[in-house]
Image: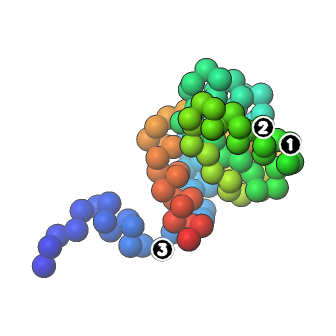
Amino acid sequence: MMKQTPNQKNEQLPVNPEAAWRLLGLATRARLAVAGTEATEQAVHRQKARLVIIAEDAADNTRQQFLRQCQLADVPYRQFGSKAELGHWTGHEARAVVAIIDQGFASRLMQLISTIET
């Protein structure tokens, strides 16, 4: 019997959506995430953003604006959660977008969000 690596074990476990939210909260407390349209836009333009999370209930104009910006800057993005959830987990009022500025947090969040969506 082959021994599984820690990554293989994590991929087999069911993912609770709250895991992604807790990780987002941790990134925010570590000052490795910025919330809101202006802060996110600056992070993308300054090439600091490693992942942009767009709320599923964001206004169409906001969604299109950040989809374009992310594609032009080659920044990965995910549509996940509501504005209220993004705001809550980043310690703000409702926020339509959040940028993660750390590659480690960004990679893990992309993994979790992809697992939750499937």
Q: Residue at x 42, y 73 (%)?
A: 13
Where residue 15 appears, as percent x and y from the top left, is 51, 69
Circles 3 and 1: CB distance less than 8 Å? no
- Are there few (<14), some (14-19), or many (20+) residues within 10 Å of tag 3? few
Image depth: mark 3 or mark 1 in front:
1
Residue at mark 1: 61
The Cα–Cα distance between marks 2 and 3, rounded to whole angstroms, is 33 Å
Residue 26 left/right relative to 1: right
The reply to whether discs 1 and 2 touch (Cβ–Cβ < 8 Å) is yes
Q: Nearer the viewer, mark 2 or mark 3?
A: 2
* Mark 2: amino acid: Gln
Q: Is residue 111 above or below residue 38?
A: below
The outermost residue toward the left is 1
Q: Compared with residue 77, is residue 1 higher up or lower down, i.e. above or below?
A: below
* Secondary structure state at the residue bearing disc 2: helix
In the rendered image, residue 90, in percent from the top left (x then y), is placed at: 69, 43
Residue depicted at 29% across the width and 61% down the height: 6
**Residue shown at the point (57%, 24%) measured from the top left:** 47
Identity, as a three-letter code, of the amino acid under mark 3: Pro
Q: Which mark is residue 14?
A: 3
Amino acid type shown at disc 1: Asn
Question: Which residue is disc 2 drawn over?
Answer: 65
Examine the image and state in which quarter residue 36 appears. top right
Crowding around mark 2 (Cα neighbors within 10 Å: few <14, some 14 to 19, many 20+) is few
